[in-house]
Amino acid sequence: MKDKIICITGASSGIGWATAKAFANQGARLILCGRRKEKLDELEEQLRVETVQLIFDVRERKAVFKAFESLASPWKKIDVLVNNAGNAHGLDPVQTANIDDWDAMIDGNVKGLMYVTKAVLPHMVESKKGQIINLGSIAGKEVYPNGSVYCSSKFAVDAFTSGLRIDLNPLRIRVGAIHPGLVETEFSEVRFKGDEQRAAKVYEGIDALTAEDVADAILYMASVPEKVNIADMVILPTRQANAYINNRES
Ligand code: NDP
Ligand code: 8X3
């Protein structure tokens, strides 16, 4: 992993933050993406490797392409893209859900991930080398109550990952996705618009995954020999059976 260039979207929090640390521990160079520059500054201070920051909202198509075009030539040679930026907004039935929440999820989790992929691909295509790891979710494998649009966004990530793997197969560019269950990060605070108590309840008694658990798995996906492509990985807390069955009792 030493000196490889790893680009991580959503590096300012949670899984992205932990992934940046995991790759930095292996001596990789990092492109850290997010909207909150102050958080990326804080992360950078804890890393002992070369880094570059790209501040943009993945929903802003022009901003995404401008950000990647602004990279100095050596930094354009990205070895691994971790397409992690994303969030859930709200947990409501379709009939009462807020359409602004839908836009945020579809524009960010789906279109944003696609824009970043397209912006990063030119060098990978030219060099016939590279790896793309998308953050899906157990919510992209099974639908749960009140999660129809978040789940739709993650089903889309799953489908896009499969299609991208087909398209890039002639170039031997590795494409895969990781689908975690409950991971205790800022995710539920964002979903519930800052309601910390409601967010904490999601993880009560479940011994949820940590961001570091998922980062370890992402690092593993990127560390196997080049002839190996881990195409799909579902990772759950032991107490979680699927998207909606959780053992909080025994
Ligand atoms: P966090 O809320 O802790 O982190 C989300 C990250 O995404 C932040 O760094 C945030 O950065 C970035 N982000 C969100 N929206 C945008 C946007 N529009 N433009 C740019 N960056 C954005 O959540 P997690 O770490 O848990 O989530 C990371 C990924 O993992 C997401 O794709 C999520 O769907 C997925 N996931 C999470 C699970 C969980 O239980 N936590 C389980 C399964 C999948 P900033 O605000 O600085 O822009
Ligand atoms: C995040 C996991 O189950 O909260 O994708 O949707 S869940």
Image: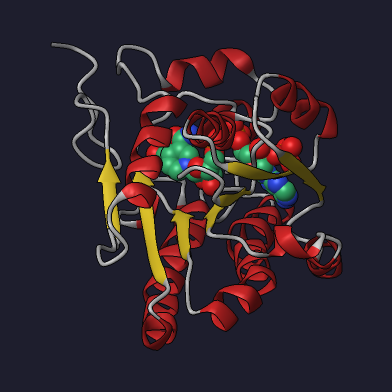
Q: Position of residue 191 (x, y in %)?
A: 60, 35
Q: Position of residue 6 (x, y in %)?
A: 57, 50
Q: Of 40 and 27, which appears nearest the observer?
A: 27
Name the quadrant containing residue 210: top left
Residue that appears at 62% across and 15% down? 196
Q: Position of residue 52 (x, y in %)?
A: 76, 44
Q: Of 246 and 177, which appears nearest the observer?
A: 177
Note whether residue 214 is visible: yes
Please state, as top left, top right, bottom left or bottom right, where the N terminus lies in the image: top left
Q: Is residue 115 left or right of residue 23?
A: right
Name the quadrant containing residue 232: bottom left
Note whether residue 91 is visible: no
- Colouring method of the image: secondary structure
Q: Position of residue 16 (x, y in %)?
A: 57, 37
Residue that appears at 68% across and 50% down? 101
Q: Is residue 172 above or below residue 211?
A: below
Residue that appears at 77% across and 63% down? 68
Please state, as top left, top right, bottom left or bottom right, where the C terminus lies in the image: top left
